[in-house]
Image (tube, grey):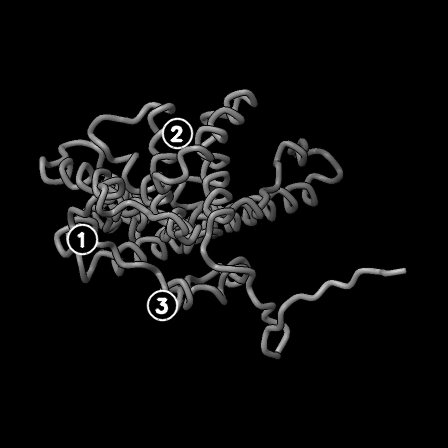
């Protein structure tokens, strides 16, 4: 699907012309009418990544870049001369030409707004069509600018974006089952039968730590304190690593970084790597069977 064209805007629409088809093809569909909070947050991240550029500015309520490029002529710099002035006719002609150019600029600005707003609306409409038909219908009815006063062609994309965000990033009226869902996820990661075992791959820790930080922690009914969060991350490590954990906690504490969660996860990965079962990996750029390392000692 191509970006709609409007008269008078051809020269100002070149910056994102080539990206419109990619946007429409790969823009993510919403997960549903009433998604779980972590699903809505994941959709938002993906959507922002796809919108980055022209349409993200529009979604955030900023002036389109193409509009900022249009500069009116300041008529105060061309003051009107008295009718008896020798250059009266020439100045009048210059002012009329400037007024005409400014009027054309106003029309072009409106067309650019309509173009970008409608492009953004189309993405929201397509994103909601399959999995959220009620939301799809709601944004269509609310964003049709032919019902505005005065009526305009096209659709109100920023309004559609905000309506979809309100549905995806809902923070109130969460059901009991939703609250229980994240409690279960939190508990399952540290259940004795599900705990990571000594010698586990560092990536196994990373997956659990990121799941907690991105999906579980923000959506818990009772928010974690910074200390509780740090303790939980360390507790994801195998029980056999308690001595290393105590040392890491002490080192971070004396550095004043006991609540630096990125640093904690990095330190936990290092502990996993130091205790990993797998031996020294074979260099992937050497296309021969691995051989034992040999050392030579100089002898007299």
In the figure, 61 relative to 156: above or below?
above
Judged from this view, the residue extending furthest toward the bottom is 288
Residue 167 visible in the snapshot: no
Q: Position of residue 20 (x, y in %)?
A: 43, 64
Total numbered circles: 3
For the residue pair 108 and 279, the one nearer the viewer reads as 279
In the figure, 20 relative to 132: above or below?
below
Residue found 36% across the figure and 42% down from its top:
238
Q: Which of the 4 image quadrants contains residue 81?
A: top right
Instruction: State which tag comes first along the sequence, 2 or 1.
Output: 1
Name the residue carrying label 1.
Answer: 32
For the residue pair 53 and 240, the one nearer the viewer reads as 240
Which of the two marks, 1 or 3, is nearer to us in this view?
A: 1
Residue found 64% across the figure and 46% down from its top:
93
What is the number of the mark on residue 230?
2
Instruction: State which tag comes first along the sequence, 1 or 3.
Output: 3
Within-10-Å neighbours for mark 2: few <14, some 14–19, many 20+: some
Residue 102 visible in the snapshot: yes
Name the residue carrying label 3.
Answer: 25
Residue found 38% across the figure and 64% down from its top:
4
Judged from this view, the residue extending furthest toward the right is 300
Q: Is residue 11 left or right of residue 131?
A: right
What is the CA distance from the residue labelled 2 to the residue labelled 3? 41 Å
For the residue pair 84 and 127, the one nearer the viewer reads as 127
Q: Secondary structure at mark 2?
A: helix
Q: Position of residue 95 (x, y in %)?
A: 62, 42
């Amino acid at each position: 699907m191509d970006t709609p064209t409007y008269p008078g805007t051809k020269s100002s629409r070149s910056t994102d012309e080539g990206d419109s088809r990619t946007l429409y093809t790969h823009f993510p569909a919403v997960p549903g009418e009433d998604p779980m909070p972590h699903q809505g947050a994941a959709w938002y991240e993906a959507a922002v990544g796809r919108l980055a550029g022209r349409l993200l500015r529009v979604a955030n309520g900023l002036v389109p870049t193409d509009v900022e490029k249009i500069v009116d002529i300041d008529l105060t710099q061309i003051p009107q001369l008295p009718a008896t002035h020798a250059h009266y006719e020439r100045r009048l002609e210059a002012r009329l030409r400037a007024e005409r150019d400014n009027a054309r600029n106003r029309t072009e600005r409106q067309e650019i707004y309509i173009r970008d707003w409608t492009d953004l609306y189309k993405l929201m409409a397509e994103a909601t069509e399959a999995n959220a038909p009620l939301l799809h219908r709601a944004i269509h009815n609310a964003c049709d600018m032919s019902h505005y006063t005065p009526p305009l062609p096209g659709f109100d994309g920023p309004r559609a974006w905000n309506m979809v965000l309100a549905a995806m990033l809902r923070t109130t009226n969460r059901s009991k089952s939703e609250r229980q869902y994240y409690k279960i996820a939190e508990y399952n990661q540290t259940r004795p039968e599900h705990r990571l075992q000594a010698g586990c791959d560092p990536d196994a820790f990373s997956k659990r730590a990121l799941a907690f930080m991105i999906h579980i922690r923000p959506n818990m009914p009772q928010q974690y304190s910074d200390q509780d969060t740090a303790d939980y991350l360390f507790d994801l490590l195998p029980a056999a690593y308690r001595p290393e954990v105590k040392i890491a906690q002490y080192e971070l504490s004396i550095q004043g970084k006991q609540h630096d969660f990125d640093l904690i996860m990095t330190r936990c990965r290092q502990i996993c790597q130091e205790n990993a079962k797998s031996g020294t990996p074979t260099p992937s750029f050497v296309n021969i069977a691995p051989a034992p390392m040999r050392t030579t000692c100089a002898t007299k």
